[in-house]
Image (cartoon, rainbow, N blue to C red):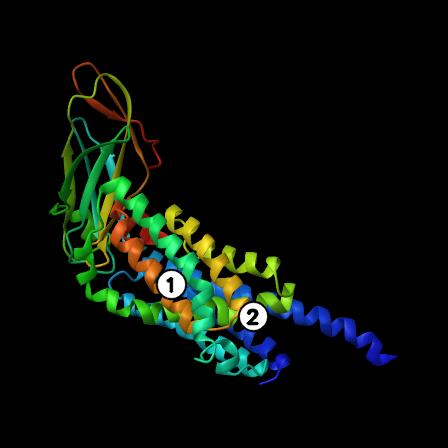
């Protein structure tokens, strides 16, 4: 009898906990973007504080859920099958971005490829995909189950984290939906990071800086 | 790590982040709008005069700006002689006064405000803080001013 009473409470708690975890990571990211990067413009490295807090929390959460790195998607066995799922959406996105950029300002600015910052892009993309899919997508699935609802949550969260940049908000919402759907079929973060990197490079190359506003988000978007 | 412990971690993380953001907010406010500026101003027959002191650095000559009827008029460093400032104990020396001659404003009632200028963030920000109360004065057709402050001021 006691067990029967506890089961629904357990189920509700699991959903509430997953939602609280999602909210907590969103708050950490927003603090990084809207507080640290804005108020410590001369000491940007301090942004590592909220990001480290978030990362530590995610690691502890994985331990609590008994999730291995393999389960999260740090693996090679399904890399090609994940990449196959991502191939056409990524190609389509790149072509659309290139065409829009060409119509707006002409051919892609290949010279932007020489920026040293771009070398960090794959690692940055992997970190973002880990947080987005390896953590948020998995917790969204705990809260809403596999499918449209959890995929929408991931896309919406990714978009919110790119406010108030309108172009990035729209693009990340679409990208977030696609990547979340693929992750739920083939959990491979390396393939997602590759797709993310290619999409980001095409954005930087093709779209004029005034349209993407230097990929700025948070308060930095305004200044 | 169990899920019940994870809830405790979640609560701890929330408290930590709240304190972090609150500390940054207070720190930023004090840095951008330090509560150390003091000063006063009044209208004489032909100028807006007064004094300004930065209590955090009393030897500093405070940069002040004059706005009349909401419009910027002029800026200067408060470094004129004001023996009453040192006598009253606001600063150790008397060189904290300012005096702004006014442009032609037209006859009627006007309002002047004096602001202390403060630079922060290695010069990336400049903020203004009003010193004292707004100075309301009347100007007649000859350009002579009368301070409309009440007697107790």
Label 2 resides on the chain identified as A
Q: Residue at x 38, y 64 (%)?
A: A195
Q: Earlier in the sequence, mark 2 or mark 1?
A: 2
Pair 2/1: label in front:
1
Residue that carries the numbered disc 1 in the rendered image: A196
Going by the image, does A98 lie left or right of A182?
left
- Left or right of A136 in this view: B106: left
Farthest residue to the bottom: give it.
Answer: B1
Q: Which quarter of the rendering shows the N terminus of chain A?
A: bottom right
Q: Secondary structure at mark 1?
A: helix
Q: Is residue A15 above or below residue B117?
A: below
Name the residue at 41% across, 62% down: A87
Q: What residue do we see at 38% from left, 47% from top? A: A167
**Marker disc for residue A138:** 2
Q: Circle 2 sits in a helix, a strand or a loop, which is it?
A: helix
Q: Nearer the viewer, residue B112 or A149?
A: A149
Count neighbours of disc 2 (C-alpha within 10 A) and say few if under 14, some if 14 to 19, many if 20 or more.
many
């Amino acid at each position: 009898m006691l067990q029967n009473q506890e089961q629904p409470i357990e189920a509700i708690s699991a959903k509430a906990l997953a939602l609280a975890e999602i909210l907590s990571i969103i708050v950490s990211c927003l603090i990084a973007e809207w507080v640290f990067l804005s108020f410590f413009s001369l000491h940007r490295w301090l942004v590592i504080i909220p990001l480290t807090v978030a990362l530590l929390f995610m690691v502890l959460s994985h331990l609590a859920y008994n999730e291995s790195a393999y389960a999260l998607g740090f693996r090679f066995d399904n890399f090609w099958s994940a990449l196959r799922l991502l191939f056409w959406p990524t190609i389509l996105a790149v072509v659309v971005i290139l065409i829009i950029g060409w119509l707006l300002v002409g051919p892609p600015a290949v010279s932007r490829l020489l920026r040293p910052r771009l070398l960090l892009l794959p690692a940055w993309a992997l970190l973002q995909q880990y947080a987005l899919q390896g953590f948020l997508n998995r917790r969204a699935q705990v809260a809403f189950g596999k499918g449209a609802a959890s995929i929408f949550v991931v896309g919406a969260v990714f978009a919110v984290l790119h406010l108030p940049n309108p172009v990035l908000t729209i693009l990340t919402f679409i990208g977030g939906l696609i990547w979340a759907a693929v992750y739920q079929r083939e959990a491979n973060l390396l393939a997602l990071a590759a797709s993310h990197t290619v999409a980001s490079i095409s954005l930087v190359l093709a779209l004029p800086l005034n349209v993407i506003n230097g990929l700025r988000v948070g308060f930095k978007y305004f200044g | 790590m169990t899920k019940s412990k994870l809830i405790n971690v979640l609560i701890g993380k929330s408290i930590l982040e709240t304190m972090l953001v609150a500390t940054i907010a207070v720190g930023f406010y004090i840095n951008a709008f330090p509560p150390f500026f003091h000063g006063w101003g009044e209208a004489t027959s032909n100028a807006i005069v007064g004094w300004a002191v930065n209590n955090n650095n009393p030897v500093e000559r405070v940069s002040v700006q004059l706005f009349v009827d909401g419009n910027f008029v002029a800026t200067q460093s408060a470094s004129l002689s004001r023996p009453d400032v040192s006598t009253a104990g606001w600063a150790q020396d008397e060189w904290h006064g300012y005096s702004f001659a006014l442009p032609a404003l037209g006859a009627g009632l006007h309002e002047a405000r004096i602001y202390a200028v403060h630079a922060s963030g290695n010069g990336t920000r400049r903020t203004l803080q009003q010193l004292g109360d707004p100075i309301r004065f009347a100007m007649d057709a000859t350009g002579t001013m009368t301070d409309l402050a009440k007697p107790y001021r």
